[in-house]
């Protein structure tokens, strides 16, 4: 059953595979057991993959990057198609169209 587009601040837990259209027109195919947190602003589109696996078809908007965070890794895209899988020991990213940039936030060190 199709769901209405999630809004910013939404947390979704999907018990079975689900296809979602986000407010910007991007499409997320979230695998069963997947969990997302969505936080869209006027400058950026952020999605946090809390657990599971999701395939993203990102609506092109160079002025408003689309960033998926999974396990401390940011996957940044403007308009592309890619899959992110958060496993216990790794984050897997598979790009099927376009390009993404992977970033890991700096780790604070104690002097």
Image: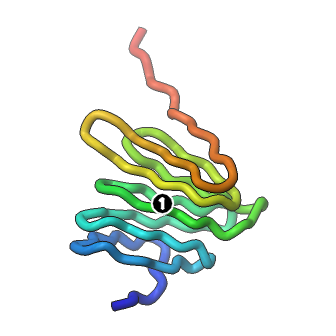
Please tell me which residue is depicted at 61% across the width and 49% down the height of the picture.
76
Please tell me which residue is depicted at 25% across the width and 74% down the height of the picture.
16
Q: Is residue 87 left or right of residue 99?
A: left
Residue 43 placement: quadrant: bottom right
- State the residue in front, 32 or 43: 32
- State the residue in front, 66 or 29: 29
**Residue 40 drawn at (x, y percent):** 56, 67
- State the residue in front, 49 or 2: 2
Mark 1, residue position: 47
Q: Where is the C terminus found, in terms of image quarters?
A: top left
- State the residue in front, 107 or 26: 26
- Secondary structure type for disc 1: strand
User: Neighbour class for label 1 at 10 Å: few (<14), some, many (≥20)?
Assistant: many
Q: Is residue 31 left or right of residue 107?
A: left
Please tell me which residue is depicted at 62% across the width and 76% down the height of the picture.
24
Seen as rendered, the residue at the extreme right is 63
Q: Is residue 111 left or right of residue 41?
A: left
**Residue 3 drawn at (x, y percent):** 39, 87
Q: Is residue 42 left or right of residue 29?
A: right
Q: Is residue 82 above or below residue 15?
A: above
**Residue 79 drawn at (x, y percent):** 69, 61
Please tell me which residue is depicted at 39% across the width and 40% down the height of the picture.
91
Q: Where is the N terminus found, in terms of image quarters?
A: bottom left
Seen as rendered, the residue at the extreme front is 96
């Amino acid at each position: 059953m199709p769901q209405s587009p999630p809004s910013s601040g939404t947390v979704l837990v999907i018990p079975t595979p689900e296809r979602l259209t986000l407010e910007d027109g991007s499409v997320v195919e979230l695998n069963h057991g997947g969990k997302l947190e969505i936080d869209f602003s006027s400058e950026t589109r952020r999605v946090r993959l809390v657990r599971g696996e999701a395939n993203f078809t990102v609506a092109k908007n160079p002025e408003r990057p689309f960033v998926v965070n999974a396990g401390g890794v940011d996957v940044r895209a403007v308009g592309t198609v890619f899959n992110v899988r958060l496993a216990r020991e790794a984050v897997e990213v598979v790009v099927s169209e376009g390009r993404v940039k992977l970033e890991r936030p700096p780790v604070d060190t104690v002097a």
